[in-house]
Image (tube, rainbow, N blue to C red):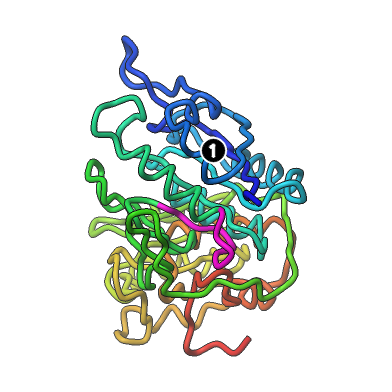
Amino acid sequence: MKKKILLIGTGGTIACEITKDGLKPEFNADELIEFMPRLKDICNIDCICLFNIDSTSITPAHWCQIAESIRKNYADYDGFVITHGTDTMAYSAAALSYLVQNPGKPVILTGSQRPIGFDGSDAKTNLRDSFICACSDKLCGVTVVFDGKVISATRAKKTHTKSYNAFESMNFPYIAHITDGRINHYITLKQTASRAFFNRVNENVAIIKIFPSMKAQQLNRMLEGLSGAVIESYGTGGMPIGILEPVLESAQKRSVIIAITTQAEHGGSDLCAYAAGCGLKKYPNIIEGFDITTEAALAKLMWILSDNKDIPSIKRLFYTPVQFDIFNPDYAI
């Protein structure tokens, strides 16, 4: 029997048409399927359109809306395909990995670099590949399917603004490749724990990038009023601690949780490689990000900090892997 798949439309380039103000999402989910009638040979498809916006307008409230839609429809479908704009897809994909944990069914995010109605668009290939993956018995969990690649949602990053090869898997292998409609599996995804849905995040978390002229006062203003922050440091985790130390001490007193990631895309952090990073280890509110992406670190902190927890519990949850999001050689769960 054919699998039953739910297509959840959210807008993005894939749904765009040309308007007097430039490209704007106009096609809803049903209209996207009309461009590809043969998809119904692969599976039975139902469509809903939660919203139809440019992905630059996506907020955490939209993440929760998508997660709630999956929860409500979970029992009725074998898999889910979410069409989404590429600019913030990595953030939404990571967030859904924490809001929809161990689903036991494929939850696929996809989109395109050119609208579906344009000649030479990548939209039809990405949609076809996504539905093939959504019907697979060997895939489960949240993934990004784009340009023939299946990427764990917590490892996806947009690395090209125009190329069809827009997304990479950071510091982790691809889950699979799709060639001529066939999935070549590299990693077997299995449900390893009970399914869990969440519907809250703490939006009071920010990303801060260290830069050469940063002053203590600037960092202090950026951290003011936050519950948590992801700080993109230099290299393996270096920061001008001598300049910023008073701010870090103040953040510790206020129990602001700080996750340290790196501005470099590959390799991850290693705070104790240099004295400029090792000094951060003394602060109990600072969490080393190791190889987690900035997008995943932000979404994970938002999820963890949605409930009040003590610092040891926050660290334990942060270092507990969710769908391959982090590898920490120093931490015993």
Amino acid carrying label 1: it is: Lys
Q: Is residue 1 magenta?
A: no
Magenta span: 135-145
Circle 1 crowding by C-alpha within 10 Å: few under 14, some 14–19, many from 20: few
Residue 45 placement (x, y as % from top left)? 60, 38
In the image, residue 102 sits, relative to residue 120, either above or below, namely below
Residue 235 vs residue 72, the one in the foreground: 72
Q: Residue at x 59, y 90 (%)?
A: 332
Q: Residue at x 35, y 74 (%)?
A: 268
Give the residue pinned by disc 1.
40
Residue 8, percent from left and from top: 58, 37
Q: Is residue 222 left or right of residue 99?
A: left
241 in relation to 155, above or below: below
Quarter holding residue 142: bottom right
Residue 297, position as x, y percentages in the image: 50, 62
Q: Is residue 138 magenta?
A: yes
Percent position of residue 313, x then y? 69, 75
